[in-house]
Every structure is written in C-alpha cells, then in structure tokens.
C-alpha cells in the first residue's frame, strides 16, 4: 500500500518539485496539494493522507496553527496524519513550536531528493525525523530561550528509575548508542526502555519525549 502524501506550501514551484520527486516511487503517492494552512486542514480531512509535508510559513494560516488543528481533538478525519514541517533555515524560529504542536520532525526545503524520500518513509513508519545532533541544536536554541510551559510531573511517577534515567538522557539529545554507553546496557535494552517510556507517557515519538522532559522540569536547559 502506498504512502499517501499531502503537500502544503504557498510556493507552487516547491509543491510541483516535491510532487515530481515523490511520485516516481512506487510506495509513495501524492494525493493532494494546499497553498495555505486552512487549505491543508480541509484537504487533510477530505483526503486522509498518511503524511503531510507542511510549510512553516504560509499566508492566512501558518503551518504551525494548521498542525495544531489537524492534530487536535476536534479533527474530523478517521485517521490522524503525521506531519513533517518544511523549513528554509537549519534552525527555524518556529521549529520548537511546530514540534510542540505535534509535528514529527522537520526537513529543509533544499534537502537532497533521497533525503526527502527517506524523511517521508521514516515519518510514515511512525518515527520522528530528528537526529540526536538536530535534537541538541533544538534544545540549545529553544529550551533556554522560550517561556517554559510547565506540565504536571506526576505522570513521571509511572516510570521506573531506569526509565527516568533514559528519559533524562533523551532530553539531553543523546542517541540510543550513547545512552547504552552511559548506562552500561545494550542498545536493544535502550530501545525497549524508550518504547515503554513513550507508551507510559502517551507520547507520539522521541521528539515529544524531549519536550516533555523539559516541560516537566526533569531536564533543565543548563543540564
């Protein structure tokens, strides 16, 4: 079954280019396009895409607000898509807000064709598209400079001591390999812990584990 894609960008050339790059792959199908955030919401509800490539900055309604509404509780479609934000700069001023709104990662608009295809497949597979190095940059750029949205930390009580240790290291941008080295455990054991953390805390992916670690105060920007 093909991965159904909706492309939301106010630049027609970007939409056409991404469509041409993606449609040549048998496992990917571009089912629609939108030029504003409002159009993206309508098209998403009508077409039920698996993945939305969402530009951060669009007229009328930006990609962040569109993401927030599509991933919100009042979204009318039967299945909720995963959203990959498109940015012009390596660290866009709005990336953190987009991730907090529920996006599963971000991609530069000038990414190589193979990077775009890889990103679509990763997002469709349920993973987040933020490498540990990018996670660190997001943390450095945003965690120390934005007003913290303090969340109730009682949910963390469901975690074991080891799972809390793993969550702290995730919050610091550590990869599974690095966490395994730090805690003297196997990488497979780390993956198991990460899966349990996401399940217990009802998190979509690793990116949102990072956000929760900061918003609950488990990790501080200076840590």
Image: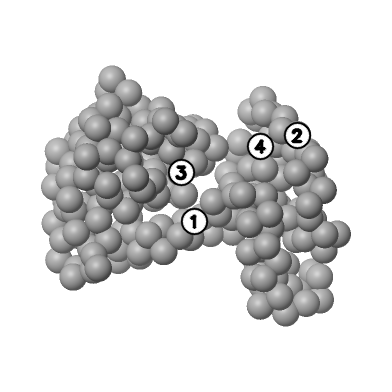
Give the residue pinned by disc 1: 128
Q: Nearer the viewer, mark 4 or mark 2?
A: 2
The residue at the point 63 percent across, 57 percent down is 199
Horizontal side of 89 relative to 196 (left or right) equals left
The image shows residue 109, relative to residue 2, as above or below, that is: above
Cα–Cα gap, marks 3 and 4: 17 Å
- Secondary structure of the residue carrying tag 1 is loop
Cα–Cα gap, marks 4 and 2: 18 Å
The image shows residue 170, relative to residue 184, as above or below, that is: above
Give the residue pinned by disc 2: 152
Give the residue pinned by disc 4: 143
In this view of the protein, which residue sits in the foreground, 160 or 98?
160
Q: Earlier in the sequence, mark 2 or mark 1?
A: 1
In this view of the protein, which residue sits in the foreground, 107 or 187?
187
Q: Earlier in the sequence, mark 2 or mark 3?
A: 3
- Secondary structure of the residue carrying tag 2 is loop
Cα–Cα gap, marks 2 and 1: 24 Å
Q: Earlier in the sequence, mark 1 or mark 3?
A: 3
The residue at the point 73 percent across, 55 percent down is 167
Is there CB contact under 8 Å for labels 1 and 3? no
């Amino acid at each position: 079954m093909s991965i159904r894609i909706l492309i939301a960008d106010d630049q027609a050339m970007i939409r056409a280019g991404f469509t041409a790059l993606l449609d040549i792959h048998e496992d990917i199908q571009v089912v629609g396009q939108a030029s504003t955030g409002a159009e993206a919401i309508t098209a998403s509800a009508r077409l039920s895409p698996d993945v939305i490539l969402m530009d951060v900055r669009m007229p009328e309604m930006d990609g962040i607000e569109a993401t927030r509404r599509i991933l919100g509780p009042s979204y009318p479609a039967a299945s909720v898509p995963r959203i990959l934000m498109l940015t012009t700069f390596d660290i866009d001023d709005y990336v953190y807000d987009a991730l907090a709104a529920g996006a599963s990662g971000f991609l530069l608009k000038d990414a190589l064709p193979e990077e775009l295809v890889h990103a679509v497949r990763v997002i469709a597979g349920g993973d987040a598209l933020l490498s540990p190095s990018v996670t660190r940059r997001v943390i450095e750029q945003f965690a120390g400079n934005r007003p913290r949205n303090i969340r109730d930390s009682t949910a963390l009580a469901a975690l074991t001591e080891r799972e809390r240790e793993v969550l702290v290291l995730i919050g610091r941008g550590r990869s599974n390999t690095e966490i395994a080295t730090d805690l003297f455990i196997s990488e497979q054991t780390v993956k198991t812990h990460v899966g349990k953390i996401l399940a217990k805390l009802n998190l979509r992916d690793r990116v949102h584990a990072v956000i929760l670690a900061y918003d609950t105060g488990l990790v501080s920007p200076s840590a």
